[in-house]
Image (spheres, rainbow, N blue to C red):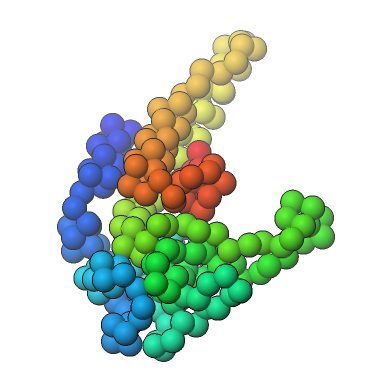
Amino acid sequence: MEFEQARSEVARILAADLRGLVTDGPPSVLPPSAARTWNLPGEDTSALFSYGLPDPARAEECTAVRGMFQHSEQPEYRSPEARGYVIGVCGSARIVAQETSGVVLAVPEARELIPQLAHLAPEGIQDETINSSAGRLVDFAWRWMWLAPVLAEQEMAADAAEMVAWKQSRAAGSREPVPDVAAPYRNLCRTVRERLRELDPMALRTDDSMWAGLVGGFE
């Protein structure tokens, strides 16, 4: 896909109606009937049952939020601060909708870093708030399922263009810095990040938040 076509596709995905993204996408995973008894805001329950989350078999394991719902009526996630319902996974983290509020957490499988990196998180890896509501999480998950392949393809194209520019520069005997041919691609990533921040400011409140990291992983 040429860059201008990719830019148009990203703009379409960011502006599209959620129902269209789900209808045109792979099969979704819907919550079990027990989820109708969960103590979540009504709009969150409606979003989960109307759209579900991307099927784990069709989504990239490390870069996508995938549907993987608990089947019990009671919250399976419990901490001193909150309780919640497991609704999906992203990489090795469980995705949890908090009881009552619907605020969404990413709960890491491992709590400790390797010894060489332990100083980066002396208190261990903590749960992270990733969306202000389960409904927003549903919206993000489907948009990202469509966005990620486009960005991945453009990342490869940008890397290849940088290599070509470097080889041409050196073949011409130049030692000047190579032109920044990847700048349009990085701007495209920033466009995605800023639009997601508009949709849910809580999700990208810091540069090291999960969603900011997923987008930034392609830059």
Quarter of the image with the N terminus in it: top left
Residue 121 visible in the displayed image: yes
x 33%, y 33%: residue: 3
Residue 111: where, in percent of width, then height?
Answer: 68, 67
Between 142 and 150, the one nearer to me in the picture: 142
Left or right relative to 171: residue 111: right
Please tell me in which quadrant of the rendered image residue 41 appears: bottom left
Residue 177: where, in percent of width, then height?
Answer: 60, 15
Residue 95: where, in percent of width, then height?
Answer: 47, 68
x 74%, y 51%: residue: 120
> Vertically, is 176 above or below 73?
above
Left or right relative to 55: residue 23: left
> Vertically, is 14 above or below 188?
below
Please tell me in which quadrant of the rendered image residue 46 appears: bottom left
Residue 144: where, in percent of width, then height?
Answer: 36, 54
Between 100 and 208, the one nearer to me in the picture: 100
> Vertically, is 58 above or below 185?
below
x 50%, y 35%: residue: 159
> Vertically, is 121 above or below 173?
below
